[in-house]
Image (spheres, coloured by chain):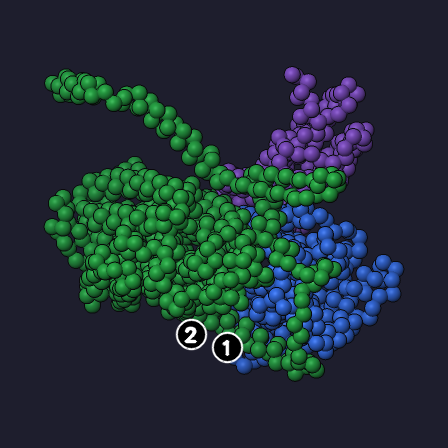
Chain colours: A blue, B green, C purple
Amino acid sequence: MSPTGIAVAVLQVVLSIASAPFLVGMMRLIRARLEGRVGAPIRQPWRDLRKLFRKERMVSTNTSIVFSLAPLVLLASAALVAGIVPFLSTTSALDQVGDLFAVVYLLLLGTVFLSLAGLDAGTAFGGMGSSREMTIAAIAEPTLLVAIFALSVSTGSSNLGAIVADTLAHPSRAASPASMLAFSALAVVTIAETGRIPVDNPSTHLELTMIHEAMILEYSGPDLALVELAAHLRLVVFLGLLANLFFPWGIATTAQPLHLVAAAGAVAVKLIVLAAVIAVIEVFIAKVRLFRVPELLAASFVLAFLAVTVSFFLV
Amino acid sequence: MIGGALALAAGAALFAIAVGAVLPVRQRVVWVGLFTALCAGAGGVAAAAVLAGGNTFTADFPDLFPLGGVRIEFDALSAIFVLATAVVAVPAAIYGIGYSARGPSSRPAQVAWPLLVWGVMMVPAAGNVTGLIAFWELMALSSFVLVLAEHHHNPEARTAAQWYASMTHLSLLTIVLALAVLAHQAGGDSFTAIRAGTDHIGPTTATVVFLLSLVGFGAKAGVAPLHVWLPRAHPEAPSHVSALMSGAMVALGVYGLIRVGWDLLGGGPTWWGATVLAVGLVSAMFGILHALISSDLKRLLAYSTTENMGLVFIGVGAAGMFASSGNQPLASVALAASMLLVVNHAAFKGLLFLGAGSILSATGTRDLDRLGGLARRMPVTAATFAVGSLAIAALPPLNGFVSEWLLLQSLVHSLPSNAAVVAVAMPVAVAVVALTGGLAAATFVKAFGTTFLALPRTVEADQAHESPRTMQIGLIALAGVCVALALAPTALAAPLQRVSLAVGGLADGRPIHTNGVYLQLSGIEAGLSPLLLATGLAVMMVAVLVVVRRGRLRRTVRDIPAWGCGRTVQTARMEYTATSFAEPLQRVFDDVLHPEIDIDVDHRTESRHYVQAIRYRMHIRDGFEHRLYLPVLSVVRRWGDGARRVQNGSIHRYLAYSLITLIVVLVVSR
Amino acid sequence: MTTTRFVQLLDLAAGLVLVTSFAVLWLRRLVTVTWVIAVQGMALAAVALVIGVYEHETELALIALMVFALRGLVLPGLILRAVRAGDEHREVESLINVPAALLAASGLTLVAYATTRDVVALSSTPQVRALPLGIAVMLIGMLLIVTRRKAVLQIMGVLMVDNGIALVMFLGTSGVPLAVELGIASDVLLAMFILQVLTARIRTKFGGTDLDQLRELRD
């Protein structure tokens, strides 16, 4: 574990936290423009967070320590993942600490803590949100791991650095059917795990439909700010994973500052493109019923499963 | 030293039995608990010595029984299972002091408890067929007594004991058959002789022995479809006994299967492994689905045991498949994953059962829908139960994650393989392991959330108090073991290598090697450092906290009531219950579970537009029980009715039977 | 065309044939399903075209053109007419739910791969390695016939089975003689017409093509 490696990891964490709210602001702006509204400026999410951080902490009398702990665990797990995933450089010190499986289970840890917090206040909404969130998380899990399986069959390792390096070495692999199937499977799971349409609507507060928002209904002030920031960060982490696992071009293989700057530019472009695509799709489709979500996830599972089969048999 | 420790264990067990039979209630409970802990501790020391030093310990007691002696052969495979037993038995014994004081303090129960602990520890230590069967039966009988321990105020326990007795006997019968055939064909009673004589065994005989032992040991491990006794018996036993039964006793099914199938028989064709894998897949899915919808805490834990044994079987089956398709390094990784899971499962399942016992003795109920808000009332139980829940849900940085990670790595790196069945089975296995992981997370969010968080749903839960000191010690010790296993799996690298070397037919080589704090696999480019993951999480949390504290202008915390949806008072009746929490997932898996749901709506007499009460009843049958066992049972019952006609109580008829038998015998043996 | 490019294009086109058959199981609106069937036919044509261009066989390219016209345009067009004519329910009704059907289909794909392993091991040309895809499409078509309630969907199932067979033929034998393909195509066309006429008559007579309801006629 070299000092430069640690520096790269810290840089990744800081940059992704700083950029996450801007990305969300951009998605909101694109949606607003396509729907014919003016929309808030891109920096609006940061403004909201700053305002929330300055407010008083209010905690329900029913709650236990889990309620205060959950935002911390949620943000910390997402931030740790942001350090592990090769966003800027494959030389991050955390690369050997955890592989893709560790990433998936770390993100699940955050989800579990937030669901517990949803149950903690004892309101009907919190429980409803938790129950739905765990349902989706549980049935999204097979897709995630089987897609990882598909990726590691062709590269022989589940380490993120190894997968990225392998794709860089064999660029034609990015266009193989296995890779494309795995990409579409992971894209569907990304949408489900980050609570975007058609699985969950991030801007709704309607009782019957909300999932994520129902869970965090009791949060306010700085705690809410942490939860929101963590949600933004998770979006960046998932999109960044999608971008760099399948299209790693531009990533630095060293820790030289110049390469890192170029890599930051490249990953920013990839994130903006992916986020814009999601925002545009969101305008045109409707949220599906909760009990249609398993169908969506079953379809994504089948894609991941085919990716494994194809990558094994069609090498 | 190993011999000394084993002798000490035997001595402590004998002393505990004597004390349990003689002393009056109050001292009895204390001394039995202490000596049982000593017995388990001594066994644990012996196991640790074998795992650290690697020397197999053997001892012969040739004249113990009239028909055959008992041989002790304590190798690394035995040791890992004895270690798992010690991990759960020492804290459980100490916990049992406080627990028994209010519950199962009767003489039979207190005598059976040390017997069970000793029996569970000696089964893996047995080095010949007679010894294995003797200790196996000792374990079965003493656990049967303990399942019945609380039958006075719990009629459920009697049905549970019936199921338990019949399944245990089925298990024993098949094991005796398997081992008898094996010993006869190989020409020797001791394991050494059997190993030497494996060449004389034909493939058909080997297959018969393997299948018989799969049934026998599978029934002990509680894998589907032989699990039916498990969700009945484990909840009814006293909680520290459930902890031992679920944490260590069921794992002996795995031990027996590995010992007979891959050590004594030396492994077989690929389909052996595939069969074990298939059984594991079905059990894991079945177990976790039923755990998910169960609202009885101990029943939930029991079903989760079926799930975990399923995962262990997946590992063993995968190891068998890899070994017979020639991939020995990967087989040793899969075996190491299973063995680590056995030890981990002993720690966290023991912890969870002890926690459930604390809840049961504090509130008098195991029904999740009648609990709630215990985190403030029982902080130690809550904190330790949280550790157990996170560990069993395989979340980093706790110990469950390490074994899950190893298992996934061994499955994922199986491709490309030259065996078609491996290529087909592995993607399915990964998907099932992933789905059980996700569902386990949901299950234990439900279990922890509805038990410890929010408002208490009943008066009993409201008035709960933290359990006595001895019980807390047991809980904290096991939580400590979970954390230690999580942060230092690198310490287990050498022991796991010795285990894989001990199983000749399955694996050779070195599954895990360590590189500082990193855990690395042989032949696979993959690394993990649980310690650094935990450190990373902690650093991030502290960093976030520091940044937030600095930026925040007003540091006050105001306590406010939760938002009651516009109503002024929020009551516990508005909370989500365990049943409602699991409902979406139950609907997703409707086609597998086939729930029977009744909804009765009572209207007010004045107008049918106003609802007075809604009753929701849901019942989920155990599919295997319904489709497999009940038909068999009804056939048996019909036979029984037929037999009743033969046996009508008339003494003349019985004498006539004797006469007829005599004549038949004479004619036949003419 | 270089060999790597050929392999990529072939895998892509054959993969599309398989993915479209999953999409047929997944989608609910009959009209959309018909479009997907059309895409499947076109992908099949692309497979033939790719092989034809790579191996410089004009006959295969001709077949590709014919497949495109018949399976990509004419047959889906006929089905679309049938769908539009029956104005009852526009939604797919199935005996098993969608996730179960998808999982069953992935199982069938595995079966296809496992059973053709030995054949694939015999030769390692890219065509033969993609052979299991054809078998999988065939099996999924049969699954569609078995599990769906609408007669229209059974027609689509028959078409899918035939697409699978055609894919196997293209990949396994590097093209069939034009005459054989013509014969098969005309057979399918004939079958389609007969089924069309039959469903139309059933509909006018009984007002629907739900098979479960039709079974009651027997009693």
Q: Amino acid at mark 1?
A: Met
Whether label 1 touches label 2, CB < 8 Å = no
The image shows residue B75 at horizontal and vertical percentages of 26, 59
Q: Quadrant of the N terminus of chain B?
A: bottom left
Numbered disc 1: what chain?
A
User: Which residue shows up at 48% across the image and 40% down it?
Assistant: B622
A290 and C63: which one is in front? A290
The image shows residue A258 at horizontal and vertical percentages of 66, 79
Q: Quadrant of the C terminus of chain B?
A: top left
The residue beneath circle 2 is B516
Query: Tag 1's secondary structure?
Result: loop
Count of numbered circles on the image: 2
User: Which residue shows up at 60% across the image and 55% down it?
Assistant: A134
Residue B616 visible within the image: yes
Query: Tag 2's secondary structure?
Result: loop
B422 and B432: which one is in front? B432
Residue B358's image quarter? Answer: bottom left
B197 and A250: which one is in front? B197
Q: Amino acid at mark 2?
A: Gly
The residue beneath circle 1 is A1
Residue A82's image quarter? Answer: bottom right
Numbered disc 2: what chain?
B
The image shows residue B76 at horizontal and vertical percentages of 28, 60
Check residue B163 in the rendering and tell me which mark sits there, or answer none. none
Are there few (<14), some (14-19), or many (20+) residues within 10 Å of tag 2? few
